């Protein structure tokens, strides 16, 4: 059995397009972005395009964790209502992203079909649509004949589906790298294997960050640390309610006769890839591994547990002891947990993937006997309400957080980066940021002091 955490980079992840990283640590920039996933990369690009000097620090490889391990869906359909305005803006960015980055991200507007197996499922989708249409999205309910036309070859006669023709997909192993390289060409310093250990302050506000390679002076730091964000915030005395979920995915060779759109039912999902194969998963089945944070945040997550219990596979294993051993506090001149574990690279759940494979083949026989070429898992950063934090932290001026995307971050990433850049620069935000504010569940601990006074800017000293 493999350990849940690995020191090496992306052992079981898709092969990621390379990025233009530098080993030259800038002495000072306007903004340091902590974390090289799609949120951090998009933030860096939006800032650099506006002439802001920015350094993106990634403790491992850019897109090495969940940004390369997701399904690749770029959607408005089925989202939390609070996310729809940002999803709409993100789809606009996705449509022009290849030209903007001068690279192939794999984005194609194929449409996404959410299949309904029962009348109850259809009613749930219809209820969502009734509220979502206020945002003028192009989603609509369709019947059996149109489903058969869009997704030929199914053995089932699906009674209804939610169809959004303007949605689509991109390649997770390409998109974040393309965005990062575009930011680099605009002047951003991209620093892989350069963990940020913590924040330095002057007069109670951000004045710099300390990386494993030395300090960088800045007035603003943006934490886009994904599953690592809670740990980073905790060392600052900032309480961020966020738990981790493990999601498993697989990739196939090309499948003759399979639908060429993106679709999912209650128990499977698939997306045709740029290489002709398919990304396949078992919908509504993520592993929730019990850790100490499961107990610390139990009451924060009770409402979500009540409504989503059927989607979780609760497991007690070695992850409990692994997280037990990770320090929750460290000095800025000491090795941080982000250097000890460069990449979260958990083994996928074979049983969940086998379920998804069987369920898909029962509905679409073209997938029977499909050749699975790769399996992997990623760690999702989840908030109690399933909505991300894209916000300044009032208790620490100059510190911003973009995290907790709860499995929705890839598709919404470009818009989230633009929103964060707006907030950092004090510009009119692209959408109303109120639903994403940190204060909605902020519980900053007063009993823990921030470790910001131990190092001067001239001494040596994470990023997800």
Image (tube, rainbow, N blue to C red):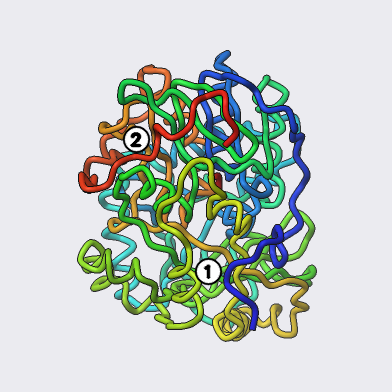
Q: How many marks?
A: 2
Residue 322, position in %: x, y? Answer: 50, 72
- Relative placement, left or right, of 79 versus 258 is left
Helix, strand, or loop for circle 2? strand
What residue does disc 2 label?
A: 391
The image shows residue 113, relative to residue 155, as above or below, that is above
What residue does disc 1 label?
A: 247
* Residue 326 in sight in this render: yes
Query: Residue placed at 46% from the left, 57% from the top?
Result: 407
Q: Nearer the viewer, residue 297 or 333?
A: 333
Residue 215, quarter of the rendered image: top right
Q: Residue furthest top?
A: 51
In this view, the mark in front (1 or 2): 2
Mark 1 Cα shell of 10 Å, populated few (<14), some (14-19), many (≥20)? many
Pointer 1 or 2: first along the chain: 1
Residue 124, position in %: x, y? Answer: 29, 66
Helix, strand, or loop for circle 1? strand
Mark 2 Cα shell of 10 Å, populated few (<14), some (14-19), many (≥20)? many
The image shows residue 417, relative to residue 342, as above or below, that is above
The image shows residue 274, relative to residue 194, as above or below, that is below
Marks 1/2: CA–CA distance: 26 Å
- Relative placement, left or right, of 445 versus 160 is left
Query: Residue placed at 29% from the left, 75% from the top?
Result: 120
Residue 442, quarter of the rendered image: top left
Query: Residue placed at 44% from the left, 25% from the top?
Result: 220
Looking at the rendered image, the quarter that the N terminus falls into is bottom right
Label placed on residue 423: none
């Amino acid at each position: 059995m493999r350990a849940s955490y690995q020191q090496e980079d992306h052992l079981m992840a898709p092969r990621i397009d390379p990025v233009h990283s530098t080993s030259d640590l800038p002495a000072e920039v306007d903004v340091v972005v902590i974390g090289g996933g799609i949120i951090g990369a998009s933030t860096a690009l939006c800032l650099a395009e506006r002439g802001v000097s920015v350094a993106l620090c990634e403790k491992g490889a850019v897109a090495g964790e969940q940004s390369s391990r997701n399904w690749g869906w770029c959607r408005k359909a089925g989202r939390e209502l609070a996310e729809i305005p940002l999803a709409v803006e993100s789809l606009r960015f996705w449509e022009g992203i290849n030209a903007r980055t001068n690279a192939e991200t794999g984005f194609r507007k194929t449409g996404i079909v959410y299949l309904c197996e029962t009348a109850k499922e259809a009613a749930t989708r219809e209820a969502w649509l009734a509220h979502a249409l206020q945002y003028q999205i192009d989603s609509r309910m369709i019947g059996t004949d149109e489903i058969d036309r869009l997704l030929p070859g199914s053995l089932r006669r699906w009674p209804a589906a939610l169809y959004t023709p303007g949605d689509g997909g991109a390649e997770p192993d390409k998109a974040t790298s393309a965005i990062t390289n575009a930011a680099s060409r605009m002047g951003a310093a991209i620093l892989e294997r350069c963990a940020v250990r913590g924040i330095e302050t002057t007069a109670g506000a951000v004045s710099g960050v300390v990386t494993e390679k030395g300090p960088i002076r800045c007035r603003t730091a943006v934490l886009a640390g994904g599953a690592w964000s809670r740990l980073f915030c905790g060392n600052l005395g900032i309480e961020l309610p966020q738990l981790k979920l493990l999601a498993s995915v697989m990739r196939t060779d090309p499948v003759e006769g399979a639908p060429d759109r993106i679709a999912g039912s209650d128990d499977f999902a698939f997306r045709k890839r740029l290489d002709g194969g398919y990304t396949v998963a078992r919908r509504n089945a993520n592993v929730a591994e019990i850790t100490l944070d499961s107990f610390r945040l139990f009451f924060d997550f009770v409402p979500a547990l009540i409504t989503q219990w059927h989607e979780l596979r609760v497991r007690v294993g070695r992850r409990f002891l692994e997280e037990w051993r990770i320090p929750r506090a460290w000095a800025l001149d000491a090795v941080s947990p982000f250097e000890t574990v460069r990449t979260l690279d958990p083994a996928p759940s074979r049983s969940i993937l086998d379920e998804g494979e069987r369920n898909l083949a029962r509905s679409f026989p073209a997938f029977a006997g499909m050749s699975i070429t790769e399996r992997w898992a990623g760690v999702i950063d989840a908030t109690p309400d399933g909505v991300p934090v894209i916000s300044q932290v009032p208790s620490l001026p100059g510190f911003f957080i973009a995290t907790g995307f709860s499995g929705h971050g890839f598709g919404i990433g470009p818009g989230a980066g633009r929103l964060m850049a707006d907030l950092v620069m004090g510009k009119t935000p692209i959408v109303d940021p109120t639903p994403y504010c940190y204060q909605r569940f902020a519980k900053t601990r007063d009993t823990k002091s921030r470790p910001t006074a131990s190092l001067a800017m001239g001494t040596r000293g994470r990023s997800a």
